[in-house]
Amino acid sequence: MILRTFGISFVVTIVALVVAFVYGGPEALLLTLILGILEISLSFDNAVINATVLRRMSDFWQKIFLTVGIVIAVFGMRVLFPLAVVWLSSGLNPIKALDLALNPPADDASHFANGDPSYETIITDAHPQIAAFGGMFLLMLFLGFIFEDKEITWLSWIEKPLIRIGKLEMLNVIVATAILIITAEYIAPDGKTSTVMIAGALGMITYIAVDGLGSLFHTEEFEEEAESSRGPSDLVKATGKAGFFLFLYLEVLDASFSFDGVIGAFAITADPILIALGLGLIGAMFVRSLTVYLVRKGTLSEYVYLEHGAHWAIGALALILMYSIGTEVPEVVTGLIGVVLILAALGSSVVRKRREEASEPEPVEVK
């Protein structure tokens, strides 16, 4: 199953490295490999969350996510998104933005002779609004999970009290808004307060709209299925409009996870071709394969705390993104926090599973 699930990712990785070598020689190959490893290490929690949503979707929409979605992930977020940032932030037209990306100043100065800022400088300067949007989207996702009533809790000493106070209507919006105001007022650089507020508000609105529409259509289709069957119905997987909005939700979620990776990539290289090969083809493909593996293997059902660990990792990433608006945070810190939380959740799941197996009564032989 591992070979079948990850086989295409290994093939794509080899092709991407060959293309990188042809494009820029050994140095380009090494940079592409580093970028791929960076994306995979930062996105393990992304794969776990993707799997929790993907298993609610019909086979058709799962295939759409794994085909059309990968195109959006590779070319949309890793190629077009940085170009769009340059285009909107600098006022350059799309053609000139692409030329700026592919042909940086020969002297590596921060400005061209005509006064245009460099591609890398524009992306870095746009970090506050990018981090505010992605951070608030992910924070809303974390708060929605942590305040939600659920039977199984991982860090019960903190999760159970949060579930109790989570019964207060719209508490996730209240908490997220308070964090956004604090960030804009006390963390954001001078002159960026309004920018951070607007970008953060748009992140919250995007989450509420996409998540709400997906839940609405999923509920309607569930009720229609239950009425048509005239009795209790098993869990109805999202199809039609519900499947579309879950697909849209996953793409926005993937974009939010990608912000830190795309920004962090510029600490390694500003070449959009290498970023597309490393973050996009190698990184995104492995994240998709890992997502499929988790769904088909039933890992989330077997190791029940994994979903909790991934959401806590999301909460940490959201706060790091908001903090990074004013202070640079090393990528290794971001990646390690997520990995540590997920590994801790996995370890707790293994212990729980063994205890349950040990407590099960042995079958009585009938003579």
Image (cartoon, helix red, strand yellow):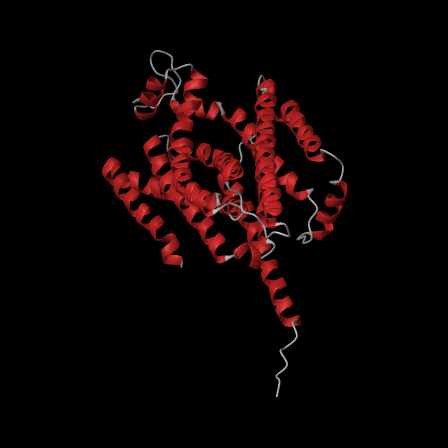
- Extreme-left residue of the structure: 22
Identify which residue is drawn at 49% across, 42% down: 332
- In the figure, residue 219 lies in which quadrant? top right
> Where residue 181 sits in the image (x, y, percent)?
67, 25
Q: Residue at x 41, y 31 (%)?
A: 76
The answer to whether residue 37 is left or right of residue 159 is left
Image quarter in which the N terminus is found: bottom left
Residue 18 as seen in the image, left or right of residue 241: left
Q: Can you say which quadrant of the picture contains the C terminus?
A: bottom right
Please state the horizontal and vertical placement of residue 346, each as a whole percent of the image: 57, 56
* Closer to us: 195 or 356: 356
Residue at image x 44%, y 23%?
A: 85
Q: Nearer the viewer, residue 333 or 62?
A: 62
Write down the quadrant of residue 305 in the picture: bottom right
- The correct choice, above or below, for 255 with respect to 46 in the image is above
Residue 6 vs residue 241: left or right?
left
Determine the residue located farthest toward the top in the rendered image: 114
Q: Can you name the residue that lies furthest to the bottom here?
A: 367
Which residue lies at the image location 71% right of the left edge and 33% below the top edge? 170
Question: Is residue 61 positioned above or below 266 on the image?
Answer: below
Residue 318 picture location, percent across and down: 58, 36
Q: How many marks?
A: 0
Residue 159 image offset from top left, x and y in percent = 70, 48
Asked if residue 211 can be seen in this view, the reply is yes
- Location of residue 347 (image quadrant): bottom right
Instruction: Report if residue 279 is visible in the image.
Output: no
Vertical relation: 106 (above or below) 156: above
